[in-house]
Amino acid sequence: MSARAAKRPQIGVLALQGAFLEHEKMLARLGANCRELREKSDLEAPLDGLVLPGGESTTQKKLLTDLGLYEPLREKIAQGLPVLATCAGLILLARNATQDHSPYPSFGTLPVRVRRNAYGRQLGSFSTTGEIKGLGAFPMRFIRAPFIEETAPEVDVLARVDGNIVAVRYQHQIALAFHPELGSDTRLHAAFLSLAAS
Ligand code: GLN
């Protein structure tokens, strides 16, 4: 074993709105350092990974543009910064979205078509257990969630619930329709940290 302690990964967590604190707690438990991203100067120090949390994608997109974070973050993701995106974060990454009437841009780095608020009002929020490729059974909490309607062939589908795609990986991007940060199963965050460490 090396005498030097392994470097703690530096993870930027978009902290404009939504469930960002829960991601920070889970990542800290796994040994990462988190930095909240709210303005351009928060992007100056190097990052090993980026979390795009759940919340309200329309609000997040407007704030990203208004605060001048949109372009520098899009560039970092396009250049290969590992990303973990949940729920609204998935909508931010998706190349196309249905039921999204926001005039502000998405990052568009993930070649999928996502449907916002896909479960309608009746089934706004629910919990289930789904199978994740490579991990097995995983608790999944959905809150006014999107699902993925279509992916490019090179996108790896990691999970479906009722036939709908709810988790994918594409290159350095992991995107989930549900909220692992609200539970206690840390395996998806650990998978993201191993991407960030590679
Ligand atoms: N319905 C939200 C949106 O469209 C996403 C919900 C969530 O992130 N839990 O942005």
Image (cartoon, rainbow, N blue to C red):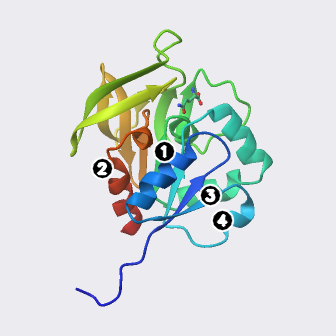
User: In what element is the residue under mark 2?
Assistant: helix
Q: Provide the residue designation for mark 1.
A: 85
The extreme top residue here reads 122
Mark 1 and mark 4: Cα distance apart in space: 18 Å
Number of residues whose C-alpha sits closer than 10 Å to that of mark 4, classed few (under 14), some (14–19) or many (20 or more): some
Mark 2 vs 1: CB contact within 8 A: no
Q: Amino acid at mark 1?
A: Ala
In this orientation, does residue 16 appear? yes
Identity of the residue drawn at 39% across and 40% down:
180
User: In what element is the residue under mark 4?
Assistant: helix
Q: Amino acid at mark 4?
A: Leu
Mark 4 and mark 3: Cα distance apart in space: 10 Å
Task: Give the numbered dot on residue 187.
Answer: 2
Number of residues whose C-alpha sits closer than 10 Å to that of mark 1, classed few (under 14), some (14–19) or many (20 or more): many
Task: Give the numbered dot on residue 176.
Answer: none
Where residue 41 sits, quadrant-wise, is bottom right
Q: Provide the residue designation for mark 3.
A: 36
